[in-house]
Amino acid sequence: MKDRFSGPRREHGKQARENRHVRDSEKPEKTMPALDEDELMALIAEHEVPFVLILDCVQDPHNLGAILRTADAAGVHAVVAPKDKAVGITETVRRISVGAADHVPFAQVTNLARTMEKLKAAGLWLVGTSDHAKSKSIYELDLKGPLALVMGAEEKGMRRLTEENCDFLASIPMAGKVECLNVSVATGVCLFEAVRQRATPPS
């Protein structure tokens, strides 16, 4: 989302109120330590039916904070993101997550494609979100069992290599004129469809 102003604006001789989102982006925040790849895989091994969320270069701390809050509510075992071109756990993220950032295991990895391969080798199915015509509706896919949901970045979605490493691609049906949802909203839709399916006893 683009800021309306690049800085404080003066109107009628008075300085306009400072845009909080601009202020946050202009002051780099300290990033909290995250799990590495080995610690992530050790954590995954502790769960019989792992439930993982992968974020491919989400950069807005407000989005990450909202996503972590949703991930906590959905019972996600770990959230994974690349170290480069992605936001980490900052004070803004912690504030927006309402404490969820302190409880949901968060891993930042050097090579996301390699980590995805390791997750597949550990028995997880990787389901990525895509607007491509070949993708099925998220409601048509089986999201039970060991699972990693993969969400793309703001505006650009998943990178090519990330998409190629997914076992399946899913889309969220859109009935209106807008083509896609905000990444934090889309994550909530996908996570809780998985929660719904996983809570349903086998027939």
Image: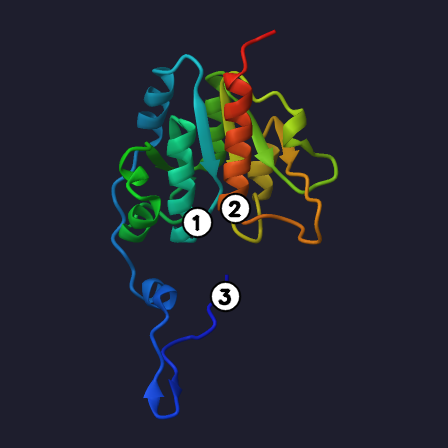
* Depth order, front residue of 31/112: 31
According to the image, label 1 marks what residue? 63
Identify the image quadrant of residue 5. Answer: bottom left
Dot 3 amino acid type? Lys
Task: Determine crowd level at label 2: few under 14, some 14-19, many 20+ residues with C-alpha closer than 10 A.
Answer: many
Question: Residue 107 location, x and y as percent?
Answer: 35, 35
Question: Residue 37 location, x and y as percent?
Answer: 36, 30
* Mark 3 → mark 2, Cα distance in angstroms: 15 Å
Q: Is residue 48 above or below residue 128?
A: above
Res. 32 mark: none
Q: Point out the tag, 1 or 3, that comes first from the N-terminus.
A: 3
Q: Is residue 12 above or below residue 92?
A: below
Q: Point out the tag, 1 or 2, that comes first from the N-terminus.
A: 1
In this picture, residue 174 sits left or right of residue 108: right
Look at the numbered discs 1 and 2 and tell me whether their residues touch, using CB distance below 8 Å. Answer: yes
Residue lying farthest bottom?
Answer: 13
Question: Residue 189 location, x and y as percent?
Answer: 55, 36
Tell me the element at label 1.
helix
Q: Is residue 110 visible?
A: no
Dot 1 amino acid type? Asn
Residue at 50%, 38% (x, y): give it.
188
Residue at 33%, 88% (x, y): give it.
14
Res. 2 mark: 3
Residue lying farthest right?
Answer: 133
In this picture, residue 194 sits left or right of residue 101: right
Question: Residue 175 location, x and y as percent?
Answer: 71, 45
According to the image, label 2 marks what residue? 183
Dot 2 amino acid type? Val
Q: Point out the tag, 3 or 2, that comes first from the N-terminus.
A: 3
Identify the image quadrant of residue 110. Answer: top left
Tell me the element at label 2.
helix
